[in-house]
Image (cartoon, helix red, strand yellow):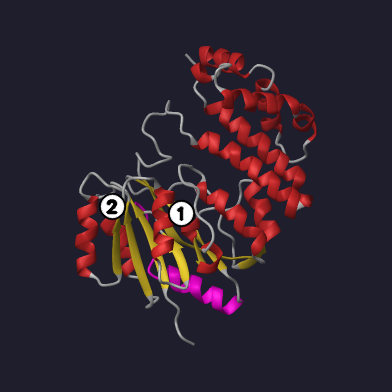
Amino acid sequence: MSKPLISIIIPVYNTRDCLEKCVDSCLAQTWPQLEILLVDDGSTDGTDQLCDRLAEKDERIRVFHKKNGGSSSARNLGIREARGEYLGFVDSDDFISPGMYERLMEAIREKNVEVAQISRDEIDASGNRLPDVCTPPKEAFFCESESFFQELLLHRGDCSFCTKLLHRRLLENRNFPEGKLNEDFYLLLQLLPEIKGIYILPKQEYHVFYRIGSNTRKKDKNDFSRVFMDIVDNADVAMELVEKHYPSLRQVCIRFGLYQRLDYLLHIPIPQMNGKNEFYVRVKRWLQRHVGDILNNPYLTKKERIYLLLLTPAPRTVRWVHSLKMR
């Protein structure tokens, strides 16, 4: 059988210190048919020039320069320019093990699936291994779409496209949402109803480098990332899809909506909790309409239920009192 081409899409923005390690790990892949698309998203620290130098060393690398528009817009450009039958994504501050894409491709071909997933680990700036965000399975298995959807709603599944290899047809008429965070979750939810499921491999071969300063890893703990609003919006998207495709998951999805709004209320700075903040008002009113679900949803933990019952009536007051006690 011929070996199909894999296009590895790497959005790049101001990662001069770790880009070369990332690219070298892609070039070292044991799967012979691959191309690497470096999409420079308007870097200002010399990363753009580094991309060009790396491309001069290996003909498998193609570089595209664009104005800064975020990771999603860079990925979308990469998808449009990719020549491969299969697409993979790597973040420019991460790196991968040499056999990752070969194992993923073998799984796709042997199991006749369109998407395969590897497991991942996380490493901090000092090289220390961090606790697993997603627990790897003990052995490879096929996870049907509805089960995978449920795992995502229970915060146990891996929504990252970086750990996956997929057939390009799945993204031909889709884009990552631009100007949003938690974009992988949003797009994966759209794909799941179209496929039978995902074949999941246990070995941790994608390595997340926890670099302070990237989109969701801010230095200042008081920063309020828009990701906390995007996760609430994605909870509403999840409910629409559940009602249409997976009605048996309705209670799980309600729990997901409660949890995402709780996460929002626990992170929003207290000064922003006011009547002029329309998003905050919507979150508060939604929770107040769902007190019955807070009391009765079987998927909430006792701790989650207590937090929600405390915060829902007067979230600003509860947060303010808590902040006084922490002084």
Above or below 306: residue 231: below
Question: Closer to the camera: disc 1 or disc 2?
Answer: 2
Q: Which residue is mark 1?
A: 121
* Residue 98 visible to the viewer: yes
**Residue at the location (36% across, 33% down)?**
219
Residue 18: image tag: 2
* Magenta part, dominant SS: helix
| Residue type indicated by callout 2 | Cys
Q: Position of residue 113 (x, y in %)?
A: 60, 72
Q: CA distance from mark 1 to mark 2?
A: 17 Å
Q: Position of residue 292 (x, y in %)?
A: 80, 29
Q: Position of residue 45 (x, y in %)?
A: 22, 45
| Residue type indicated by callout 1 | Asp
Q: Residues within 10 Å of mark 2 (few under 14, many from 20)?
A: some
Q: Quadrant of residue 196?
A: bottom right
Q: Position of residue 69 (x, y in %)?
A: 37, 45
* Residue 96 visible to the viewer: no
Above or below 212: residue 265: above
Q: Check residue 180 for magenta coloring.
A: no
> Element type at marker 1?
strand
Tell me where the magenta segment starts and ends, as one range. 93-111
